[in-house]
Image (tube, grey):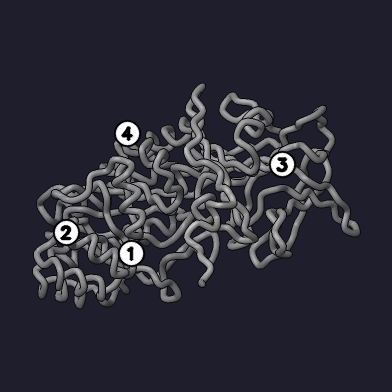
Amino acid sequence: MSVKQSFSIIRSQICGHSVTALAEKFGSPSYFYDAATIRDRISQLSQFDVIRFAQKANSNIAVLDLMRKQGVVVDAVSAGEVHRAQVAGFKVGGGSHDVVYTADIFDREALAMCASQNIPVNCGSPDMISQLGKLAPGREITLRINPGFGHGHSKKTNTGGDTSKHGIWHSQLDQCVELANEHGLKVAGLHMHIGSGTDFEHLSQVCDAMKQTALAVGDSIHTISAGGGLPTPYRDSDTYLDIDRYFQIWDATRKELEGSFGHPVSLEIEPGRFLVAESGYLVAEIRSVKKMGENLFYLIDAGFNNLARPILYGSYHPMSVAFAGEPTEETQQAIVGGPLCESGDIFTQEEGGFVCSRELPVANVGDFLVIECAGAYGFVMSSNYNSKPMAAEVLVDDEQVHLIRARQTPDDIIAGESIPG
């Protein structure tokens, strides 16, 4: 049964802690993550044999450590993410599958690392197979297959079809299996991910494509990955995914393959946004309330350098106000923008850059705007544009509040730069 989400436009607390007190202690803007929400989302996926977190969604080592302690393993898309996983306590090498490297290319550093440290690789291109095979013949690999169709909440998050760069094109499967055989590489698993917000109609297509692909490879397959893309509710009209039904469809596919191969097949899922999005809050101070013609603007001290999803995808985030002074239930239409010297620095916009307003409480300078469902693809996509420091990150675990990344200083921003002479 689908359950609708409900958001409020007034928020006084995050995880039982006063928003204003948190902002006073850690500064503004800051990211806050609710550990209990992350644990809950992990538990919802417990029917799957393996939960592999797509750490690109939120790669703070404290978040990775929390995942590891809940039995979650990780996916890495760069040498840097492999390093993060190691620092967070995940095992690398020695036959461990705690960390799998998934990408469409090897840069030179990642190739050397995967070969020397025996890191399992999920290959997204024929070139990856030959490059790994030359350095590390005899390994097991998995293949990420592009089935020829995709799905996503934005064209920019669609990871299947012929306009996507991701994965091995389905008609090249035989070629890639032959390429693996030439290097003594064993194709032990398959991965198929077509984009974010997958619905059940597209899911049935993916499962059928996975089954046909696995049967074409043969009984060397011991693992299939459902990929990620589990939808996250951002609006009151959005509903939660029926996880049981989602699992049952994939489990039926797995069981068919087990019957054909005569051995167990492990079923992985690779969520990113699903595990962390709803845990996150970006708290920013309102620094100006001003009229521009008929439009009212709330200008806050966070910009797209802190949260890029709205300017990249026109993504909608629920918003609320935490009052520093006397609260009010009166509302008004407001456009929410940031401090950057860019006209596109607007949080209330649709895909294509169309600016829109949001019904929000009547607020004043010194009140706080809370951008919710900001735990995924938030801090990880931040930058120092306009020489703005990256925000602080804070993990809230019931009564415990931990600073897990200090706010950058001006010297941090210019570290590594030099003047010749």
- Callout 2–callout 3 Cβ contact below 8 Å: no
Alpha carbons under labels 4 and 3: distance apart:
34 Å
Give whichever of 20, 54 is nearer the camera.
20
Q: Residues within 10 Å of mark 2 (few under 14, many from 20)?
A: some
Alpha carbons under labels 2 and 3: distance apart:
51 Å
**Residue named by callout 4:** 69
Q: Residues within 10 Å of mark 3 (few under 14, many from 20)?
A: many
Q: Secondary structure at mark 4?
A: helix
Give whichever of 294, 407 is nearer the camera.
407
Query: Picture coordinates of residue 377 (x, y %)?
Result: 51, 52
Alpha carbons under labels 4 and 1: distance apart:
26 Å
In this rendering, position of residue 1 left or right of residue 326: left
**Residue named by callout 2:** 188
**Residue named by callout 3:** 285
Alpha carbons under labels 2 and 4: distance apart:
27 Å
Q: Is residue 30 above or below residue 101?
A: above
Q: Please tell me whether mark 2 or mark 1 is closer to you in this view.
A: 1
Alpha carbons under labels 2 and 1: distance apart:
17 Å
Mark found first going from the N terminus, 1 or 3: 1
Amino acid carrying label 3: it is Glu
